[in-house]
Image (cartoon, coloured by chain):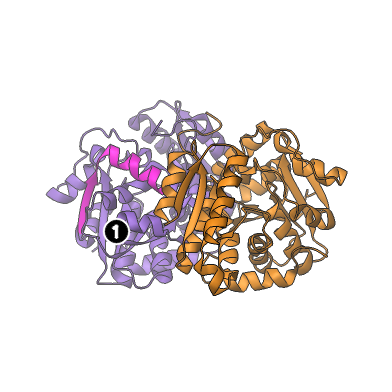
Chain colours: A orange, B purple
Amino acid sequence: MMPVNFDDVAAAARRVAPHVHRTPVLRSRRLNEILGVDLALKCENLQRIGAFKARGAHNAVLSLDDDQAARGVVTHSSGNHAAALSLAAATRGIRADIVMPENAPRAKVESVRRLGGHVIMCEPTIAAREAAAEAIVAATGATLVHPYDDPRVIAGQATAAVELIEDCPDLDAITAPVGGGGLMAGTAIAARHMRPSIRIVATEPEQADDAWRSWSTGVWTAGDPPNTVADGLRTTVGHNGLPILQALLDDFVTVSEAGIVAAMRLVWETTKLVIEPSSAVPVAALMERKGGMQGLRVGLILTGGNVDLDQLPWQ
Amino acid sequence: MMPVNFDDVAAAARRVAPHVHRTPVLRSRRLNEILGVDLALKCENLQRIGAFKARGAHNAVLSLDDDQAARGVVTHSSGNHAAALSLAAATRGIRADIVMPENAPRAKVESVRRLGGHVIMCEPTIAAREAAAEAIVAATGATLVHPYDDPRVIAGQATAAVELIEDCPDLDAITAPVGGGGLMAGTAIAARHMRPSIRIVATEPEQADDAWRSWSTGVWTAGDPPNTVADGLRTTVGHNGLPILQALLDDFVTVSEAGIVAAMRLVWETTKLVIEPSSAVPVAALMERKGGMQGLRVGLILTGGNVDLDQLPWQ
């Protein structure tokens, strides 16, 4: 029995629709020529808070009953999920406590505060983050919304693929990056249900290949410490997401750091879209002709566009 | 009698529709908060060849009769019009000769060649460019398509505003940048006809303010040599465009170089769209609260997204 099924996804789609953008699907002839595919780009970089994470956070917050909601939500994140949960809590008018490491970029902290999130600083270790979040849960009864392994979050992230396949019903393949695996697991559930014959391809940086190792061996592993430019993917695959990937993927490929940077730049130049390095990972797979997608109609989720413009990776 | 009227624009809209993108209109809550307006962004950076210039070039080429077309087209440009005319000529299956200065960026030259344009190099002076183009016209009978002062080009550029107002019929104001004035003149013709009460605001860099001076004094002037980061606006306003601006504008404002760079960065960060500096000029006017557009529903044409990613102006 899978932790998330398509009924959960369909319910999530109804729940989040009034609160998140139905992002456009864009195409580029030039990019298609270079990559040798017919590419439909699902632009979650144009989503609220600049990333698909708005979907999962809204589904989690809007799934709470009134008593749960009244006690608020909490998470630990220094990335897009922190902003997403703050926004979703504001949508429902409830409190969000966001545990962030002391060394989090100032812009990320300010973004959470601007959206109404309550920031709690902690030491920059996973243990310290988790301890701080658990202490808040114990004290307030708030609901912990994990950034990627919460089934409500997985179902919410799946709604990007639902919209993409509704808008492009003839896709031959669909691909996305894997960090914690929430987006990829949700994408696989939606795609396999809506278009059973579709080829589902996961992509990950070689330098953060814990999910690929876990998927390949069938044994969950944290892998080596991640060391990738794709800052959104420096997480370890979740225990709920992994079995979904094992059940539903057709292929899982990894790409080089140089490939990620080249793909990011290629997308900026050909599509005029600002994407973050994580979004470039499946594009790098297409550039490197990996994943068996050549010549196909490929749906690709551009996951986000939150980039430090003073530190672009090709500089 | 104006050199272009709305009938010309309506004909251009029918002519170019099968060949150019109907670009999306995007919105950003965060950008609206910062600028204090309700902004509809017409994304010509997502247009073919990455700029609105595809519109005017297609209208000019598709307006030729078969005899004229058979003799080809010619222009002098090192910018987006060079690529646009090459593409439009390829659409019709005719020859395009593009006179470019010897010091044109290699990427621009390669882009023209990739689109099928025939590149003729000349010395990097206006006189040399014009002489080379005239020599080709004399030798081959090709039609010169001026980058911005050709009435067919003005009518073609107007089609961006036509689509914007069709998609957002309740706009209170519309704004765009002025280089040679082709886009702004076309925008003004379309907007005044389709929505007579609309406020029409032209914007230009202080450091390339020839059009503003000509408009303010009523006397055409080339102004001082332009010295602006907005490379697409380093041209002198055309003799066909100027009287249209004089007849139809409600206001014309200029903005600082620092304002242009800040506005460009703001758009990248809030909308995740790559725009070139020229596109940021009307955004800078809104940041600086110029043009009397506060609190209004404003349509703004993002003119293009062709940027050298190795030389961003905030670095």
Question: In the current view of this chain or complex, which residue is farthest to the front?
Answer: A139
Q: Is residue B263 magenta?
A: yes
Name the amino acid type tagged 1.
Gly
Which sits in the foreground, A183 or B291? A183
- Residue ID at (67%, 66%): A162
Q: Image quarter for residue B41?
A: bottom left
Q: Position of residue A255 (x, y in %)?
A: 73, 37
Left or right: B298 in relation to B105? left
Which sits in the foreground, B273 or B144? B273
- Residue ID at (60%, 64%): A60
Residue B70 can be seen, yes or no:
no
Q: Main secondary structure of the magenta part?
A: helix
Q: Image quarter for residue A283?
A: top right
As displayed, is residue B148 above or below residue A197? above
Q: Position of residue A1 (x, y in %)?
A: 83, 65
- Residue ID at (79%, 54%): A245
Question: In the current view of this chain or complex, which residue is farthest to the right?
Answer: A217
Q: Position of residue B24 (x, y in %)?
A: 49, 61
Residue B291 can be seen, yes or no:
yes
Q: Position of residue B284 (x, y in %)?
A: 30, 47
Question: In the current view of this chain or complex, which residue is farthest to the left?
Answer: B217
As displayed, is residue B31 above or below residue B207? below
Judging by the rendered image, the residue that carries numbered circle 1 is B36
Report the magenta residues as a range. B251-267
Q: Secondary structure at mark 1?
A: loop
- Mark 1 Cα within 10 Å, few/some/many (few <14, many 20+)? some
As displayed, is residue B167 above or below residue A57? below
Left or right: A255 in relation to B100? right
Q: Is residue A247 magenta?
A: no
Q: Chain of mark 1?
A: B
Which sits in the foreground, B37 or B234? B37
Which sits in the foreground, A65 or A183? A65
